[in-house]
Amino acid sequence: MEEYIINFSKTYRFTYIKIENKQSMEIIYNLLKNNIKLSNINDDIILLYYGIYCGKVEKNYDEMKQYFLAAVKQGNSNALNHLSYYYFNIEKNYDEMKNVY
């Protein structure tokens, strides 16, 4: 599973973030390989990968932002970096980028 996620991160050009929890690994794997989304996710690493998936694969930026913001609220700095990158490079909304930092 982890190898698949690592290869996915290389294909979609983002840095692989280590997934320590086996259950989280399975959920993220099922999302990336089988497009299986769960609701009521509370794990910041899963939220991070859901955000990445929505942005990179589905191009659903509204949903991506929701997942990243939820992960940021749990202290996930990687989600904050992804969100800032989006505002700076995709949306070109520099004020919003400053607000999330």
Image (cartoon, helix red, strand yellow):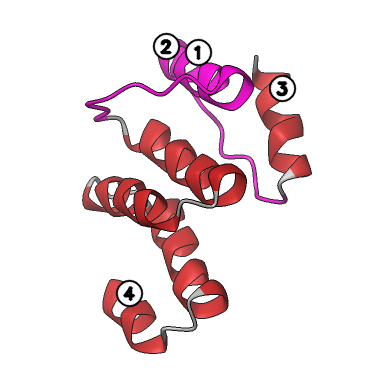
Q: Position of residue 91 (x, y in %)?
A: 48, 76
- Residue 12 is marked as none
Q: CA distance from mark 3 to mark 1?
A: 11 Å
Magenta segment includes 22: yes
**From which residue to which does the magenta span run?**
13-42
The quarter of the picture where residue 62 lies is: bottom left
Q: Which residue is mark 2?
A: 23
Is the residue 49 above or below the residue 27 in the image? Answer: below
Tell me, yes or no, whether the two marked residues, 1 and 2, touch with CB atoms within 8 Å: yes
Q: CA distance from mark 1 to mark 2?
A: 5 Å
For mark 3, give the secondary structure.
helix
Q: Residue at x 41, y 35 (%)?
A: 45
Q: Earlier in the sequence, mark 4 or mark 1?
A: 1
Magenta segment includes 65: no
Q: Which residue is mark 4?
A: 101
Q: Amino acid at mark 2?
A: Gln
> Which of the two residues, 97 or 34, is positioned nearer the viewer here?
34
Q: Which residue is mark 3?
A: 4
Mark 3 crowdedness (10 Å alpha carbons): few <14, some 14-19, many ≥20: few
Q: CA distance from mark 4 to mark 1?
A: 31 Å
> Which of the two residues, 99 or 60, is positioned nearer the viewer here?
60
Q: Position of residue 25 (x, y in %)?
A: 51, 18
Q: Amino acid at mark 4?
A: Tyr
Q: Which residue is mark 1?
A: 26
Quarter placement of the N terminus: top right
